C-alpha cells in the first residue's frame, strides 16, 4: 500500500483576510462574510458543478499552507484552553498536524459563470485566508452530516460571549457599506488570542483592503482607527 499520496490544488479562495489574525476560529460563525472560490484553469469546467446549485451548504477541504512543518507533535496547546494545557492533536483542529488538512462547512450563496475565471462559487461564513488552496469540494448532506446529539468536548460551545462593538462615527464613515456587517461580526467574535487580556493594548489586522485597529476592555471592543491600505 502506498504511504504517500500527491494531491492537486483545484481552487483558491478569495476572502477579505490578508493574514490569519482576525479570521473566525470556525466556519459559520460570521455568515455575513462573503468569499469566492475560483478554480484553477484545468478545473474550470461547468460540468463539474452540475447539480451543486441544489445544495445549500458545502464542505471545503483545504490546506493550512501557512502552517506547514517538517515534524509533528502528538500534543498541541489549543488557544481555546489558554495555551497552557496540552491536548492530543487529533482531539483538536490545530493547523499543526501530520498532514496540514482542514475542513470547513460554508453556505453556498450562488454560482456565477464569469468570462475571466469560468464558474465561480460565492460562499458565506468561510474561515480561510485569502489565497488558501482548496483540495476538494463536497456537498453538505443534512441527514448524514448533522448530528444534533453529538458531544463537542472542550469546544462544545463557541469560545466566550460575543463582544459589544463600538465604532465611532468618524471611523464608521471610512468603512464601505458592503463590508460593515461582516466586519462587525468578525470583531464581535473577539479576534485576540484567548490568553491576552490587556485593555491598553491596540490590536490590528487587515480586512477587505483596510487596516483595522481596536482595543478591548471587558466585554466592549472599540475600533480606534481604520485606514485604507496602500495599493
Image (cartoon, rainbow, N blue to C red):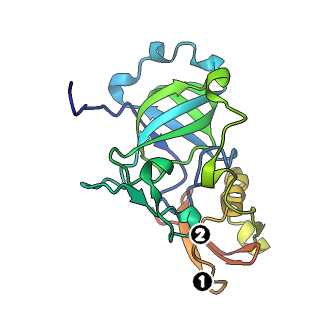
CA gap between label 1 and label 2 equals 14 Å
In this rendering, the count of numbered labels is 2
Q: Nearer the viewer, residue 67 or 168?
A: 67
Quarter holding the N terminus is top left
Could you tell me which secondary element the residue under label 2 belongs to?
Answer: loop
Residue 201 numbered tag: 1
* Residue 203 placement (x, y as % from top left): 57, 75
Q: Residues within 10 Å of mark 2 (few under 14, many from 20)?
A: some
Quarter holding the C terminus is bottom left
Q: Nearer the viewer, residue 69 or 107?
A: 69
Q: Residue at x 42, y 46 (%)?
A: 131
Residue 226 numbered tag: none
Q: Nearer the viewer, residue 195 or 203?
A: 195
Does the CB distance between marks 1 and 2 fall below 8 Å? no
Residue 194 numbered tag: 2
* Residue 25 placement (x, y as % from top left): 58, 54
* 176 w.r.t. 57: above or below: below
Q: Residue at x 68, y 52 (%)?
A: 182
Compared across the picture, whether 44 is left or right of 182 comes to left
Asked whether residue 116 is in view, the answer is no
| Label 1 or label 2, whichever comes before in sequence order | 2
* 8 w.r.t. 55: above or below: below
* 223 w.r.t. 67: above or below: below
* Residue 107 placement (x, y as % from top left): 64, 34
Q: Residue at x 43, y 39 (%)?
A: 62
Q: Residues within 10 Å of mark 1 (few under 14, many from 20)?
A: few
Amino acid at each position: 500500500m502506498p504511504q504517500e499520496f500527491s494531491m492537486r490544488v483545484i481552487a483558491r479562495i478569495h476572502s477579505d483576510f490578508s493574514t490569519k489574525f482576525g479570521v473566525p476560529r470556525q466556519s459559520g460563525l460570521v455568515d455575513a462574510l462573503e468569499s469566492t472560490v475560483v478554480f484553477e484553469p484545468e478545473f474550470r469546467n461547468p460540468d463539474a458543478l452540475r447539480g451543486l446549485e441544489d445544495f445549500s451548504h458545502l464542505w471545503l477541504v483545504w490546506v493550512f499552507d501557512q502552517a506547514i512543518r517538517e515534524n509533528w507533535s502528538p500534543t498541541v496547546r489549543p488557544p481555546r484552553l489558554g495555551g497552557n494545557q496540552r491536548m492530543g492533536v487529533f482531539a483538536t483542529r490545530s493547523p499543526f498536524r501530520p498532514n496540514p488538512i482542514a475542513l470547513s462547512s460554508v453556505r453556498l450563496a450562488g454560482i456565477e459563470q464569469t468570462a475571466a475565471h469560468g464558474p465561480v462559487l460565492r460562499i458565506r461564513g468561510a474561515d480561510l485566508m485569502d489565497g488558501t488552496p482548496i483540495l476538494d469540494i463536497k456537498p453538505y448532506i443534512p441527514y448524514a452530516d448533522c448530528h444534533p446529539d453529538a458531544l463537542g468536548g472542550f469546544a462544545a460551545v463557541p469560545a466566550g460571549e460575543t463582544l459589544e462593538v463600538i465604532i465611532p462615527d468618524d471611523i464608521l464613515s471610512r468603512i464601505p457599506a458592503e463590508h460593515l456587517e461582516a466586519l462587525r461580526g468578525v470583531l464581535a467574535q473577539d479576534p485576540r488570542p484567548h490568553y491576552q487580556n490587556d485593555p491598553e493594548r491596540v490590536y490590528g489586522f487587515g480586512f477587505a483592503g483596510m487596516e483595522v485597529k481596536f482595543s478591548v476592555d471587558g466585554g466592549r471592543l472599540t475600533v480606534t482607527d481604520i485606514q485604507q491600505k496602500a495599493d
